[in-house]
Amino acid sequence: MESEERTWALWKNDRINKEEAELLRTVAAELPIPLDQEASRDVEILVDAFIRRNDAVGLAAPQIGISKRVIVFRSRKFAEKTPLQKESGDYEVLINPRITQFQGEEEQDTEGCLSCPEISADVVRWTEIKVRAFDREGNKISRRYTGFLARVVQHEMDHLDGTLIVDRGESIYYPREKKAFFDKVFGKQPFVESDLK
């Protein structure tokens, strides 16, 4: 399946990907609980796609073309650039997650996104959240995330509602040589030219 091999993105090679953009902008469907065979397969496709990567701390199912409410993310060793082992305890999977509490403060930081290649954006997120979800076996779980991990989980959960960093960005940074393309794509949003590679 093509979705297992690549990440869906709003644009590539200075062209908008209409089909991919449409799916990325769609509110994803919940998985049935208990998980049926198809839902379990979708979860495992996402996990396999994620652990093969060395360039992401998280991945949401819509980013590989599966419009379902499931995310996977590193829970430690964020700075490592090596693929994860499937049986390691270094990542978490959340199925049908929902944030039940926002706490701490709102904090701005710069984020990138595989589905918005070549740019980054200043995004405001809560520093502490509580999430209810189901694990890979379909068991109810409740988790509290703080700091960077809270940011990662909020970023990935945004994908489930068709929201991307370009929607939340206070400022969007892009490579100077791509100015004409990104000005055309985003119109008059607050952009900052940079030397992003």
Image: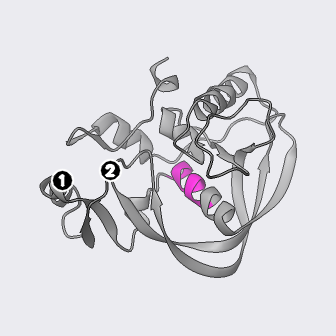
Secondary structure mostly seen in magenta is: helix
Nearer-the-camera pick, 63 or 78:
78
CB within 8 Å, label 2 to label 1:
yes
Q: Residue at x 33, y 44 (%)?
A: 10
Residue sticking out furthest to the top: 1
Q: Where is residue 72 in the image (x, y as percent from the top left)?
A: 66, 43
Q: Is mark 2 on a helix, strand or loop?
A: loop
How far is the residue under mark 2 from the one under mark 1?
Answer: 9 Å
Which segment did they paint magenta? 154-161
Residue 45 figure quarter: top right
Q: Position of residue 11 (x, y in %)?
A: 29, 42
Which residue type carries mark 2? Glu
In the rendered view, tell whether residue 137 sits above or below residue 69.
Answer: above
Q: Does the stretch in magenta take in 156?
A: yes
Relative to 122, 38 lies left or right: right
Q: Position of residue 140 (x, y in %)?
A: 86, 47
Which residue type carries mark 1? Lys
Kindly identify which residue carries mark 1: 178
Kindly identify which residue carries mark 2: 118
Q: Residue at x 68, y 27 (%)?
A: 44
In the rendered view, tell whether residue 64 sits above or below residue 16.
Answer: above
- Badge 2 crowding class, 10 Å Cα cut-off, few under 14, some 14 to 19, many 20 or more, is some
